[in-house]
Image (cartoon, helix red, strand yellow):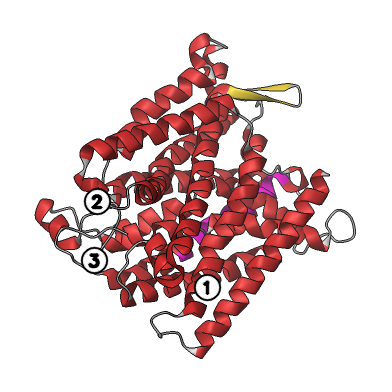
Amino acid sequence: MKETETGSSDLTPLLADADSLENQSPRGLASVSGAVFNICTTMVGAGIMSIPATVKVLGIIPGFAVMFMIAVLVDITVEFLLRYTQSGKSTTYAGLMAESFGSLGSLAVQICVMVTNLGCLIIYLIIIGDVLCGNESGGTLHLGVLQEWFGIQWWNSPAYVILFVVLFVMLPLVLLPHMNSLRHSSAISILLAVVFIAISSAMAIYAFWKGKTQNMRLLPDFANQVSIFDLFTTVPVLVTGFGFHVNIHPIRSELSRPSDMSYAVRISLAICIAIYFSIGFFGYMLFGESIMSDILVNFDQNSDSAIGQLVNNTVRLSYAMHLALVFPVINFSLRTNIDELLFAKKPVLAKDKSRFTILTCLLLALTYTIAIVIPNIWYFFQFLGSTTVVCLSFIFPGAIVLRDVHGISRRKDKVMAILVIIMAILTSMIAIATNLWTVG
């Protein structure tokens, strides 16, 4: 944890304190709407594409119930973090864990954040490359949008196209020093997610009108293809879709009134529940049992009409653009934690432009290189991301409450913390074991 030059207790690893921000720029203090956009952008990433597959496994009614339950638990654990942030001196997640568990607690958070966020960023680049440049799966070549338009050329290979996107789309955004500066790109990313949902919904309604929709199950199909253990494999996907705990403190520190953070969180959770249930319901209605773990694959089809092809390409491109705009928000917390781990005694990163620029460029170069060298790591990072996101979202906040270094936890808080930790551990263990058994 780093202190500002004035010794203020309002501390962040990347941002200057609120007073200095106010003096430096009239846009230094964020609004509730800006916080909502950034929180929603953090949640609605690549995981949205797997929501329809979870609804297929769970059924419509349990699917919505599980989404709502996870959102409630997330709201509870976020409230835990905000309460202890208010009572303590640290304004970073790692610093909060350090207050309760020392340097090992801080290191655990930083490792989880780095594994989760770096994995997500690499996956984002891989998916963007697949959308624009295509890929080869199971001996079948799936053409990307650029290859469909211009044919297979040297310049529309993944290495060149992803490099172009990294340099001219992502680099200008990741070089912005404050989370509040990303509020406009975050708003656009949410708009693109809404566009994706609107198109999918329109296609599903049109198919329903024509009598071409697929049969949907309200409950899990235990009689044929779903076991009770398969239900647990959907929980990590949904948990990942609601995981934004790593960006709580950067977003909170830029609010004009930090007390508004709880309000922004609840609005964001309500928006994301609506987004996830909409894409889950209409995606399942449109593709039924043929839906893939990544619904984008279902749109990767040759259409008999020009309008159908245009719709498919619009869906794929809006998704790729959405991920490109989510990228800098996820990168923000990754960079913060790496800087706090490696340069704990240095001034705040926003005040050291050379260190900020070098660290940003190195992270971007590393992400790009891994995405090009290892272009098929979806399931590997899904496995790691699910386990680390569970720690960040449930286990660590619950542990902070049980440790209770500030003596502010009530009995019902500790009971809830125990229940959350037990549920998180059991669910993760069953999900991991089921996935390993399936792979084996």
| Numbered circle sitting on residue 299 | none
**Image point 45% across, 85% down: which residue?**
409
Q: Position of residue 143 (x, y in %)?
A: 62, 21
Q: Which is nearer the N-term, disc 2 or disc 3? A: 3
Q: Secondary structure at mark 3?
A: loop
Mark 1: which amino acid? Ala
Q: Position of residue 436 (x, y in %)?
A: 78, 49
Q: In the depicted view, which residue is nearer to us: 354 or 144?
A: 354
Q: Secondary structure at mark 2?
A: loop
Residue 169 as seen in the image, left or right of residue 199: left
How crowded pointer 1 is (Cα within 10 Å; few <14, some 14-19, many 20+) is rated as: some
Name the image quarter holding the N terminus: bottom left
Q: Which residues are magenta?
A: 269-287
Residue located beneath label 3 in the image: 10
The residues bearing labels 1 and 2 have C-alpha atoms spaced at a distance of 28 Å
Q: In the depicted view, which residue is nearer to us: 159 or 387?
A: 387
Q: Is residue 335 magenta?
A: no
How crowded pointer 3 is (Cα within 10 Å; few <14, some 14-19, many 20+) is rated as: some
Residue located beneath label 1 in the image: 399
Residue 59 visible in the snapshot? no
Q: Position of residue 123 (x, y in %)?
A: 55, 38
Q: Which is nearer the N-term, disc 1 or disc 2? A: 2
**Image point 50% across, 83% down: which residue?**
413
Q: Which residue of the protein is positioned furthest toward the bottom in this rendering?
A: 411
Name the image quarter holding the C terminus: top right
The residues bearing labels 2 and 3 have C-alpha atoms spaced at a distance of 12 Å
Residue 189 as seen in the image, left or right of residue 380: left
